[in-house]
């Protein structure tokens, strides 16, 4: 029963320092988001979400048309489009571009899809040095870890952790001040930017009609990556498309606010191909990689297709009671949090991480904050259903099967249900009167090993109802209304 | 099958669409432009922009402000027409008209300040919109630790909506449009706000 995912969870739950770091950071993100989407600050917020959802739905439903449009536009401005069916095709394409232009050093800005295809490992093996330039991502690269959070990759690291890492990997004097640590990174990375042959970026949006990629950031590393080296390679999942630049009026208002609580980030770059005649700065060559890698499989499932509307803001992780306990590294695959719980099983196939969609309390917070209105809770339920359907009957765990059959039998029989409640009362209370049940009997024991059960009320709803009905003078409202009418 | 055909055919079969099938028009873009007076736009820009804004009543006062901000720094300036007309590029220690790519890069990397124009300023959210061109090179507003941008008041727009109303496809104008919301910053270490990561730590906008 125990998967790698479940083991990771227990490690994260036992680490109190980590628990505190995650809670503080995600609380801060959530508060900042609320400040900038509040009705008195952004009255059109819900309207923007609806519009964003409609635009994404339209684009995804006609994706072939927009993919061909963007290809034609990029090519018409002297850029190149490379189609990549899977991760292998994508990494091979980047390596081939590097070889063609004799590139040895590549600066990289943060890109989830490049994590997904394990680009850095492949580049290193082929003699090309990839350098992550987003501060959080650079920290993660030095630590040889994957991103902890979609927006804040090193969210789990304290200033002390980063200081130790810089001493070990960069040989600098130990200093814990974030200001000083940032300046160390600036100095090291500035040299890399100016010497790099190639810049590799992701894409927050790909604008079909413009043949452009849009990149949103605060540090300036993306502007460096896309403007300083002579080659710019943008790696984008095929779902990143939007039809027109004018749609950005909606998406840019939502992305910064949902991701980091900013009405606008420090830099938003709208880049359409190599530098033009007369421009001095900017790349000689521009490549746009359009990566499938499992996305068309999601596209084929009409019910769950909306998973592809995601703009990777990370807001769902910040409000998720599960993410906030188990942290980003517990999730298998590249994407963490609620969106990861629905993306990973669909990208990798349901068999790979069958417990992932079950790691949710279905509280609905993720769906409530999603700027493009992906119904994540409903996707989780649909995946649970698919996974259970896919399990061969004989492989299902017998006690679980019996328990659910028994449950269904009891729930359909009011008298039996009442009796069951009576017995549960006898079994579960009695530890002490009104406290939570911390250790359950028999079959409940494994469940209560990691959870507490709320105490059962001393009197059931049915008992209270009967008592009220028989006590003098009181009758249910609808009956009272009827009497009045009759009179 | 080559990847292009494979991806496209997977997309089409997932969506039940035919080769060459057109798409209906997308839902209309949501563009709502507020009606704000010039004073209101400038007031809101100053409030929302995360750098420092100086509203100069005259060209002379603008020149004095810029001179003070770049005083003591090697400065690289863009060839922006408005900057040239104001004579700002003639201030001491200002280099302009550098056309050699290598030299421009080195100058940007060593300069203490970058002086540029701006295509537009946007009041809400506070941001500059800068189209790259042979008069406005990308690295001048990026590499030096301080950035001073100067523009006339009539180029202060109300909102992102108005920006995309006047510039419906930036790709027709330039290879690069950048929106600048303030100094380069990060919160990647313990969410503690730190300025001047890779771009400028100080940004000044002068509106005349």
Image (spheres, coloured by chain):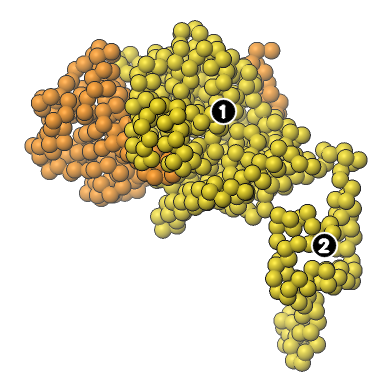
Chain colours: A yellow, B orange
Task: State the residue position of label 1.
Answer: A115
Residue A235 is situated, as x and y percent measured from the top left of the image, at 52, 23
Residue A4 visible in the current orientation: yes
Q: Chain of mark 2?
A: A
Name which quarter of the figure residue A240 lies in: top right
Q: Is residue A111 left or right of residue A417?
A: left
Disc 1 and disc 2: Cα gap in Å?
45 Å
Q: Which mark is residue A419?
A: none
Q: Residues within 10 Å of mark 2 (few under 14, many from 20)?
A: few
Q: Is residue A147 above or below residue A434?
A: above
Q: How many marks?
A: 2
Residue B202 is situated, as x and y percent measured from the top left of the image, at 26, 37
Q: Earlier in the sequence, mark 1 or mark 2?
A: 1
Q: Chain of mark 1?
A: A
Task: State the residue position of label 2.
Answer: A441
Which of the two marks, 1 or 2, is nearer to us in this view?
2
Residue B57 is situated, as x and y percent measured from the top left of the image, at 12, 43
């Amino acid at each position: 029963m125990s998967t790698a995912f479940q083991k990771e969870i227990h490690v994260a739950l036992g680490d109190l320092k980590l628990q505190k770091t995650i809670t503080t950071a995600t609380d801060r993100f959530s508060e900042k988001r609320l400040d900038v989407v509040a009705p008195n600050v952004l009255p059109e917020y819900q309207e923007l979400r609806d519009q964003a959802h409609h635009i994404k739905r339209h684009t995804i439903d006609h994706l072939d048309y927009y993919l061909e449009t963007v290809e034609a536009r990029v090519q018409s401005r002297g850029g190149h489009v490379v189609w990549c069916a899977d991760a292998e095709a994508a990494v091979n394409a980047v390596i081939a571009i590097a070889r063609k232009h004799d590139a040895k050093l590549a600066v990289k800005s943060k890109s989830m899809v490049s994590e997904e295809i394990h680009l850095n490992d492949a580049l290193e093996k082929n003699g090309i040095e990839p350098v992550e330039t987003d501060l959080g991502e650079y920290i993660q690269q030095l630590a040889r870890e994957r991103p902890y959070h979609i927006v804040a990759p090193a969210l789990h690291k304290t200033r002390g952790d980063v200081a130790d890492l810089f001493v070990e990997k960069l040989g600098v004097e130990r200093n814990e001040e974030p200001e000083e640590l940032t300046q160390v990174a600036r100095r090291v990375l500035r040299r890399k930017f100016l010497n790099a042959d190639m810049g590799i970026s992701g894409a927050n949006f790909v604008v079909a009609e413009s043949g452009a990629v849009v990149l949103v950031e605060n540090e300036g590393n993306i502007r460096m990556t896309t403007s300083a080296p002579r080659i710019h390679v943008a790696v984008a999942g095929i779902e990143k498309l939007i039809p027109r630049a004018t749609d950005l009026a909606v998406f840019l208002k939502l992305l910064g606010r949902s991701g980091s609580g900013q009405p606008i980030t420090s830099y938003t770059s709208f880049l359409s191909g190599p530098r033009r005649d007369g421009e001095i700065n900017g790349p000689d060559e521009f490549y746009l990689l359009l990566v499938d890698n499992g996305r068309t499989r999601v596209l084929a499932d009409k019910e769950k297709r909306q998973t592809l509307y995601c703009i990777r803001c990370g807001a769902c992780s910040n409000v998720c009671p599960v993410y906030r306990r188990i942290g980003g590294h517990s999730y298998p695959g590249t994407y963490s949090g609620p969106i990861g719980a629905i993306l990973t099983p669909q990208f990798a196939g349901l068999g790979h991480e069958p417990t992932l969609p079950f790691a949710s309390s279905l509280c609905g917070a993720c769906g409530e904050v999603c700027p493009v209105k992906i119904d994540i809770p409903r996707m989780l339920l649909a995946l649970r259903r698919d996974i259970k359907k896919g399990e061969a009957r004989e492989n299902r765990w017998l006690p679980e099967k019996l328990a659910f059959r028994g449950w269904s039998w009891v729930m359909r029989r009011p008298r039996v249900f009442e009796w069951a409640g009576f017995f549960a009362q006898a079994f579960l209370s009695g530890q002490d009167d009104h406290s939570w049940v911390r250790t359950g009997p028999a079959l409940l024991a494994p469940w209560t090993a990691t959870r507490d059960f709320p105490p059962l009320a001393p009197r059931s709803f049915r008992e209270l109802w009967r008592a009220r009905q028989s006590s003098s003078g009181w009758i249910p409202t609808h009956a009272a209304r009827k009497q009045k009418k009759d009179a | 099958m080559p990847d292009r055909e494979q991806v496209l055919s997977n997309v089409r079969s997932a969506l039940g669409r035919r080769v060459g099938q057109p798409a209906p028009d997308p839902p209309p873009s949501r563009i709502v432009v507020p009606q704000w007076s010039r004073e209101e736009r400038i007031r809101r820009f100053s409030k929302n922009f995360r750098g420092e804004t100086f509203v100069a009543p005259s060209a002379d006062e603008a020149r004095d402000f810029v001179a003070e901000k770049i005083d003591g720094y090697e400065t690289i300036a863009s060839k922006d027409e408005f900057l040239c007309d104001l004579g700002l590029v003639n201030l001491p220690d200002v280099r302009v008209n550098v056309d050699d790519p290598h030299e421009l890069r080195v100058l940007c990397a060593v300069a203490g300040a970058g002086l540029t124009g701006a295509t537009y300023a946007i009041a809400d959210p506070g941001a500059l919109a800068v189209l790259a061109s042979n008069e406005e090179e990308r690295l001048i507003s990026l590499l030096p630790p301080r950035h001073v941008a100067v523009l006339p008041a009539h180029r202060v727009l109300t909102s992102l909506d108005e920006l995309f109303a006047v510039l419906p496809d930036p790709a027709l104008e330039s290879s690069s449009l950048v929106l600048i919301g303030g100094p380069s910053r990060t919160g990647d270490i313990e969410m503690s706000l730190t300025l001047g990561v890779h771009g400028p730590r100080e940004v000044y906008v002068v509106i005349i």
